[in-house]
Image (cartoon, rainbow, N blue to C red):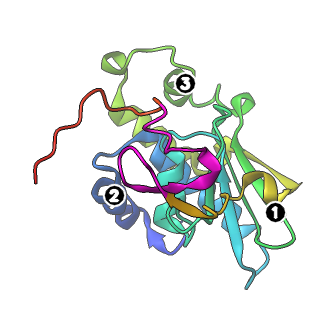
Amino acid sequence: MNICTYSYEEYLHLVKSFHGTLAPGLLIGGFMVDLAMKHLPEGEFFDAVCETPVCLPDAVQILTPCTIGNGWLSVVSFGKFAITLYEKYGGRGVRVYLDTGKLNQWPEIRDWYLKKKKKNEQNSELLFAQIKDAGHGLFSIQHVQVDPEKVRRKKMGPVAVCPVCREAYPTRDGEKCRSCQGDSPFTEIKPIS
């Protein structure tokens, strides 16, 4: 059993080293990426869209050249466990999603995915065994046409130096950077050097 170019065991090792732990969503994501890759035309340059920020983007980044950093992977927070791989310029692609209609034959996966059990109540050994046994059988696949402009990362554009913090920022954000406009996640910043 392979997941893309890796044996199942190699993929498990990659998941642990990249994600920090063996997560069910990342294991399922590997099968999803594998299935999507099997339905893409050979030799096409492609981008990816994940419809959740949870686990699935890591599977795409492990198994494809699409990463958040290079801009070939976009994440839209729809809360759906689905990925789309699509031709970079024309937008033709395939969407693979975890099909809830197929979960009843895999009760531990169903209970995990639909959050019917708390994490400490789950049988992780059974959950991982069911994921391996189910493989591609958990998913449905669709042909899609993507509007790349709706998901492609926007270019930074012109840059200025913020008059308050003296750091560079995109001028599209206004007279000063977003942090200095009050949109910062930091409640305190203290210089070290």
Q: Which residue is mark 3?
A: 107
Q: Tell me the amino acid under the disc marked 1.
A: Gly
Q: Residues within 10 Å of mark 2 (few under 14, many from 20)?
A: some
Q: Nearer the viewer, mark 2 or mark 3?
A: 2
Residue range in magenta is 161-181
Residue 28, horizontal then vertical, whole percent: 53, 46
Q: CA distance from mark 1 to mark 2?
A: 27 Å
The amino acid marked with disc number 2 is Phe
State the image quarter where residue 171 is shown: bottom right
38 lies above or below 60: below
Identify the residue under disc 1. Answer: 93
Q: CA distance from mark 3 to mark 1?
A: 31 Å
Which comes before the other along the chain, label 3 or label 1? Answer: 1
Q: Circle 3 — which element?
A: helix
Q: Main secondary structure of the magenta part?
A: loop
Name the side, left or right, on which 26 lies relative to 153.
left
Q: Amino acid at mark 3?
A: Pro
